[in-house]
Amino acid sequence: MNSFTNIVEEIKSIISAEFAPKKVFDKDVAEVLGISQMNFATMKKRNKIPFTELLDFCAKRSISINWMLYGQSPESLVEATNNYMIKYYTDINASAGGGAENEFESMESLEIPQQFVFMLGGERELKNIEAINVSGDSMEPTFAYNDIVFINRNKTDLNRGGIFTIRTEAGLFIKRIQKRIDGMIDIISDNSVYPTQVLHPNDIEVIGRVVSRFGDVN
């Protein structure tokens, strides 16, 4: 996958005509992506790619996200990626903090790079995969605000534990789940600032197991 710096340079090339004859700077790229200069600088330092903003940028300019992330030419992607599409609910935010879920569900098809398919369980699992956004910080460093996570709605068994998207009376959450011997469920935040909650299984609706984001899930 291309580094943050490489992607920024590609964006500069793409938008250079809009700024001609002026030179395009990092602050211009941050503005085009809708990211504050401070957050942009932090992302650059950490090599953290702003996937949500990058997807919007590519969609508006009819650019293949595969080309931007992997440097693949559009011609090489025609056969490889045409069938690798999943549902992406752009208006749904599963909270890694306080519960959150938007009332209206806006869905679009998200093209998945061929190299990424195996991380989601292979082609046969794609029909069960949906993508949503993350908000909040209780699952840092595993997830960060505005990450896109991929959920397998066919995997709802909590016996082996793992990271799941769940719904409680407080809203929609992404949490690490662990089943206790007494049958109760530990709702665990990877950020140690947040305490573990204990709920009865009847108080939880399991939406699906989080199988990946743009990167591996720990």
Image: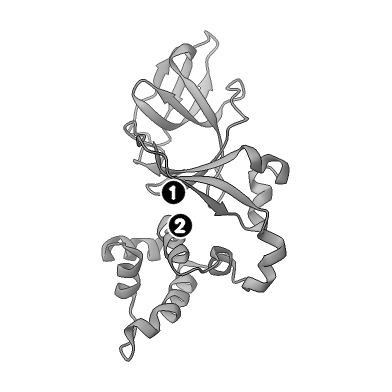
Q: Left or right of 26: which side holds 162?
A: right
Residue 208 drawn above or below residue 105: above
SS of the residue at dot 1? loop
Residue 115 in the image, given as x and y percentages of width and height? 66, 57
Q: Let me know if residue 158 appears in the view.
A: yes
Mark 1 vs mark 2: which is more N-terminal?
Answer: 2
Image quadrant occupied by the N terminus: bottom right
- Tell me the residue that label 1 is attached to: 147
Residue 30 in the image, given as x and y percentages of width and height? 32, 68
Residue 86 in the image, given as x and y percentages of width and height? 58, 47
Q: Residues within 10 Å of mark 2 (few under 14, many from 20)?
A: some
Q: Left or right of 162: which side holds 120?
A: right
- Amino acid beneath label 2: Phe
Q: Left or right of 81: which side holds 57?
A: left
The residue closer to the viewer here, 24 or 185, is 24
Residue depicted at 51% across the width and 24% down the height: 206
In three-dimensional space, the C-alpha distance between marks 1 and 2, rounded to whole angstroms, equals: 7 Å
Residue depicted at 60% across the width and 54% down the height: 112
SS of the residue at dot 2? helix
- Amino acid beneath label 1: Asp
Image quadrant occupied by the C terminus: top right
Residue 115 drawn above or below residue 70: above
The residue closer to the viewer here, 108 or 45, is 108
Q: Quadrant of residue 158?
A: top right
Q: Which mark is drawn over residue 51?
A: 2
Tell me whether circle 1 and circle 2 mark residues in contact (CB < 8 Å): yes
Residue 183 drawn above or below residue 76: above
Q: Let me know if residue 218 appears in the view.
A: no
Q: How many marks?
A: 2
Q: Residues within 10 Å of mark 1 (few under 14, many from 20)?
A: some
Residue depicted at 35% across the width and 82% down the height: 18
Residue 24 in the image, given as x and y percentages of width and height? 34, 82
